[in-house]
Amino acid sequence: MTALPFPLAPEPDEITAEIGRKLFAGGADFLKGVVAMDGLPPADRPEVCFAGRSNVGKSTLINALTGRKALARASNTPGRTQEINFFTLGESHYLVDLPGYGYAEAPVAVVKQWQALLRAYLSGRATLRRAFVLIDARHGAKAVDAEIMGLLDKAAVPFQVVLTKADKVRRADLDAALARTRTVLAKHPAAYPELILTSSDKGEGIASLRATIAGIT
């Protein structure tokens, strides 16, 4: 079986880009932080979730997507956010920010608690349409990323890799990181066959990611 090439997603055409822009311009607001499954909001619309290692730039990317500088609060302390945070995108979608993973500072009991919540959410949320796994473009996929991908495979949740901080890496190093990431992805049946390369600071890939989310129903 030939492995998927996982090409970089092309830039959206004008119409598709505008649909994505309108979704995120239509009002993006923090709804609630959830620490247990019984606290989840009603499953009344499609939702996408963002997962990634601590300090991968997840909060910064959410802020760039929504055009709100402080909608998602970035923390200087890895692993500080231990809730599943729900944001509304207009009246049509939820954007879900999962706790960062791959950190050593949090107590073992806390890590186990959020891991259990994460597994329950991923396997039991019928309206979850796609997970976006954020990976630092300077490093490519690591073992801890492969773990979350394995969890998504088991939960039968399609996931798509979004590479962050593309402006902070040289082209040769980026190519190497992409190669490492593609090698890892080839082992995961739930992986969506396109990568999205982003830079929150430069705006690279933001239109493409918005359009991708807007197209998920």
Image (cartoon, rainbow, N blue to C red):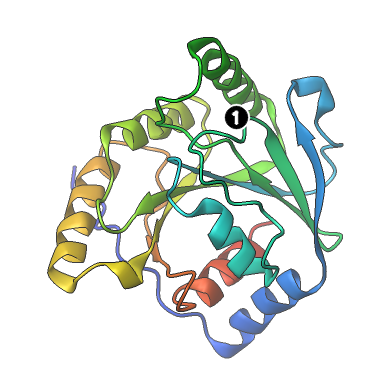
Q: State whether residue 119 is above or below residue 89.
A: above
Q: Residue furthest bottom?
A: 14
User: Measuring 67% from the left and 67% from the top, which residue is drawn there?
Assistant: 69
The type of residue carrying mark 1 is Leu
**What x and y, as percent, mark residue 6?**
30, 58
Query: Is residue 191 in view?
Result: yes
- Can you say which quadrant of the picture contains the N terminus? top left
Q: How would you rate the neighbour count of disc 1 (Cα within 10 Å): few for under 14, some for 14-19, many for 20 or more?
A: some
Instruction: Choose top left, top right, bottom left or bottom right for residue 14.
Output: bottom right
Q: Would you name the residue on which mark 1 appears? A: 122
**What x and y, as percent, mark residue 203?**
49, 77
**What x and y, as percent, mark residue 51?**
51, 42
User: Measuring 38% from the left and 64% from the top, which residue is drawn there?
Assistant: 165
Q: Residue furthest front?
A: 76
User: Measuring 53% from the left and 86% from the top, which residue is drawn there?
Assistant: 13
**What x and y, as percent, mark residue 127?**
72, 40
Query: Is residue 215 in view?
Result: no
> Across the whole image, how many numbered discs are drawn on residues?
1
Does residue 100 appear to the left or right of 5 in the view shown?
right
Return the residue nearer the eye: 9 or 207: 207
Does residue 188 appear to the left or right of 27 in the view shown?
left
Q: Secondary structure at mark 1?
A: helix
Return the residue nearer the eye: 217 or 203: 203
Q: Residue furthest top?
A: 109
Q: State whether residue 172 is above or below residue 192.
A: below
- Can you say which quadrant of the picture contains the C terminus? bottom right
Does residue 195 appear to the left or right of 20 in the view shown?
left
